[in-house]
Amino acid sequence: YGCVFRNCSKLTSVTMDLPEWTETANSPQTGTNMFEKCSSLRSLTLNLPKAKTLGSYMFRNCTSLESVVLDMPELKTIGDYAFDHCTNLSLLSLNLPKLTSIGLWAFEYCPLCRTDATKWNLPAVTTLKTEAFLAAAGSASYTVDGVAYTDGYPGPFGTICLPSLQTIGTQAFGRRSRVEKLDLGSGSLVSIGTAAFQQSRVREVVIGNPTDADVAISV
């Protein structure tokens, strides 16, 4: 099912209502490259209650996509580059109780300016891979591949709660990522990659319960 609608530049709306869909041995990921570079895609509705993966590159470079709601009770993995360079993605809602891994560059350069991360439900995430949220919710102008982007919206992105997180990849929140607070709950963290928060706007990182003399870092 890879690349099925790739580069369909006139496609504006997608509804996937597949309550019995699940991965197979021949198709281990849902939708690899399926909608990549659908530059006019604005509306997305996914009803995939049994799906365990969102494929790599599934919505990469869908530059008109504005809103995504993922309410998928069995989802365990968001693939590499899944929403990379969705440069108009402003509203992202995540209710993913079994998600364990967010892939490389999964939400890189997604502005998320209408997103309240405090409402995300991600209790089982253990791994944020390299640059998963690089420049996500960035509030400054930036240039990517020679194209200038400006997002002049004010205000914090909010708090991300990841109580089971064990691994933060290289530059996971780097380069002007506007995450204000990262709450890692009970303190499962094992490793933090190089430059994980380099040039980010994070103000506070909580690891464990500060009243139990664990780690609380404020900037």
Image (cartoon, helix red, strand yellow):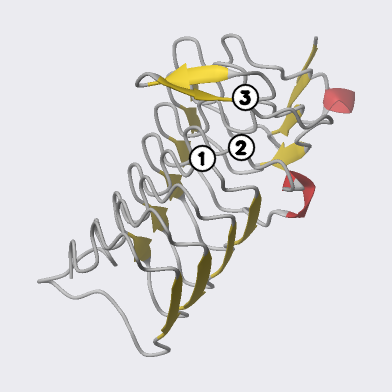
Inter-mark Cα distance, 1 to 2: 6 Å
Pick out the residue farthest to the left: 26
Compared across the picture, whether 48 is left or right of 201 comes to: left
Q: Which residue corresponds to the image point at 46% horizontal and 39% vertical from the top-left?
A: 127
Q: Position of residue 212 (x, y in %)?
A: 84, 25
Q: Is residue 146 above or below residue 125?
A: above
Which amino acid, mark 2? Pro
**CB within 8 Å, label 1 to label 2:** yes
State the image quarter where residue 186 is shown.
Answer: top right
The nearer-to-camera label among 3 and 2 is 2
Q: Quadrant of the N terminus?
A: bottom left
What separation in Å lies between label 3 and label 2 (alpha carbons)? 9 Å
Q: Which structural element holds mark 3?
A: loop
Tell which circle, 1 or 3, labels the residue nearer the N-terminal end.
Answer: 1
- Dots 1 and 3: beta carbons under 8 Å? no
Dot 1 or dot 2: first in sequence order is: 1
- Which residue appears at 30% of the width and 49% of the height? 57
Q: Position of residue 42 (x, y in %)?
A: 51, 62
Indicate the position of residue 88 as horizontal and vertical percent values: 56, 45
**Residue 155: quarter of image:** top right
How dense is the environment of label 1, judged by Cα within 10 Å: few (below 14), some, or many (20 and up)?
A: many
> Helix or strand or loop: what does disc 1 sit on?
loop
Instruction: Identify which amino acid the numbered label 3 is placed on.
Output: Ser
The residue that label 2 is drawn on is 111
Q: Earlier in the sequence, mark 3 or mark 2?
A: 2
Residues 131 and 75: in front is 131
Can you name the residue that lies furthest to the right here? 211
Instruction: Report which residue position mark 3 lands on.
Output: 177
Residue 87: give its label. Answer: 1
Q: Circle 2 — which element? A: loop
Q: Residues within 10 Å of mark 3 (few under 14, many from 20)?
A: many
